[in-house]
Image (tube, helix red, strand yellow):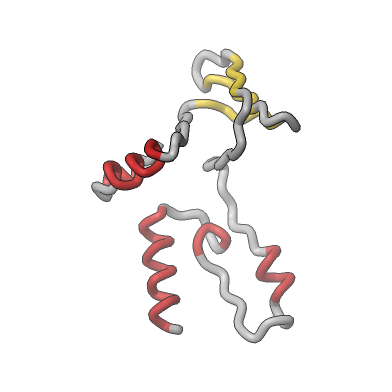
Amino acid sequence: VGERVRQALDAPHVLGRLASRDVSLTAGHLFEGIDDDGTVRLRELWSRRPVVRAGVDRVVLSMQRAGETSLRDALAGRLPDVRLLGDALAPRGHLEVLHEAEELARSL
């Protein structure tokens, strides 16, 4: 978790903030599903043992990423300026996305 955050020397800041908010990070697991009661079902990647986490209120997945253009497509023609950036355009690392967002902000 956070490989590129560590490479950018941001780990103490980013991971520390997450820890201070009681965020639990889980790497090396396959995602199997979320039940209506907030139970998350995982499977350990190498051992294939099932793992169950109860009472989860939020899940952020980072896996098999692909661009997602449906919102841009739905808004195109309805708004004067619709732009696509970040992982919606194409999956990349956070540094590339931050650079792209800053470049867009400066152009506005």
Query: From what the image shows, is residue 54 above or below residue 20?
Result: above
Residue at (34% x, 46% y) in the render:
14
Q: Position of residue 92 (x, y in %)?
A: 45, 55
In this view, the residue in front, 77 or 13, is 13
Q: Position of residue 38 (x, y in %)?
A: 67, 31
Residue 12 figure quarter: top left
The outermost residue toward the left is 9
The quarter in which the C terminus is drawn is bottom left
Q: Position of residue 80 (x, y in %)?
A: 65, 86
Residue at (59% x, 57% y) in the render:
67
The quarter in which the N terminus is drawn is top left
Query: From what the image shows, is residue 57 above or below residue 102?
Result: above
Q: Position of residue 36 (x, y in %)?
A: 75, 32
Relative to 104, is 60 on the left or the right?
right
Q: How many marks?
A: 0
Residue at (63% x, 58% y) in the render:
68
In this view, the residue in front, 69 or 9, is 9
Residue 89 figure quarter: bottom right
Query: From what the image shows, is residue 72 above or below residue 108?
Result: above
Relative to 60, is 70 on the left or the right?
right
